[in-house]
Amino acid sequence: MGETEAGIVRYQIDAGRSRFIVRAFATGLLSAFAHNPTFAIRDFTGVAEFVPDTLENASLELRIKSGSLELTDNVSDKDRREIERQMREEVLEVDRYPEIVYKSSGVTAEKIMASQYRAIINGGLTMHGVTRDCRITAQLIVSPDTLRANGEFSMRMSDFHIKQVTAAGGTIKLKDELKSSFDIVAHK
């Protein structure tokens, strides 16, 4: 992608070399017998822009295909199909809300050492038709042609008007909070 105005460099996310996962946690009467599902996000794009050596004027935009979440847990094929169906049709409602979008509104970064930064990215996360503030903490390694970012953030399903997932007649539920972690590679 290269340089834009004012010395800002643009890096395009390489989803094939990146990892982005979402973890949910079981609760309820029979939660000891349930598993905590982990989903990999398989289809996402994004752009990070900033001035090299300072991370000034930094911005980030991510676009996730909501139907691309894939259960990574070791479960039977039948259970996998049912969990993924429920996630797509009942929880995320991917036909109505096909995309999840994150757009930064401000980035602060602290240089740890040459080419390495600790960043706090504030922005808006739009999911299920609702936009909420979302803060992401990340460690960045910047080279002339590559950006690598890893970190995590949490969100609550209720903030996005997403219905609570239940199983076994309501005796197993997913907690409201989801944890996301990422290891993203981007190229100029």
Image (cartoon, grey):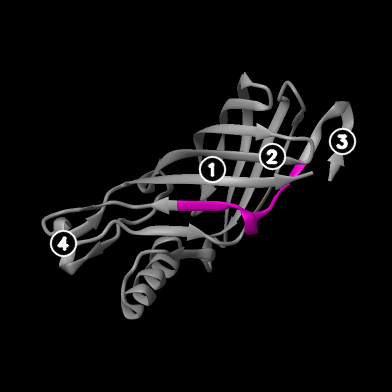
Q: Label 1's element?
A: strand
Residue drawn at 48 percent across, 59 percent down: 40
Residue at (61% x, 22% y) in the render: 108
Looking at the image, do the residues carrying marks 4 and 3 touch, with CB atoms under 8 Å apart? no
Q: CA distance from mark 1 to mark 4?
A: 32 Å
Q: Is residue 8 left or right of residue 162?
A: right
The spot of residue 158 in percent (x, y) is: 36, 46
- Where disc 2 sits, the SS reads strand
Q: Is residue 72 left or right of residue 164?
A: right
Q: Which residue is mark 4?
A: 33
Q: Residues within 10 Å of mark 1 (few under 14, many from 20)?
A: many
For the residues labelled 3 and 1, the Cα–Cα distance comes to 25 Å
Q: Nearer the viewer, residue 34 or 160?
A: 34
Instruction: Say what amino acid the circle numbered 1 marks.
Output: Leu
Residue 135: x, y in percent? 50, 32
Estimate the x, y position of residue 123 in percent, counting from the top left: 57, 34
Upstream in the sequence, badge 3 or badge 1?
A: 3
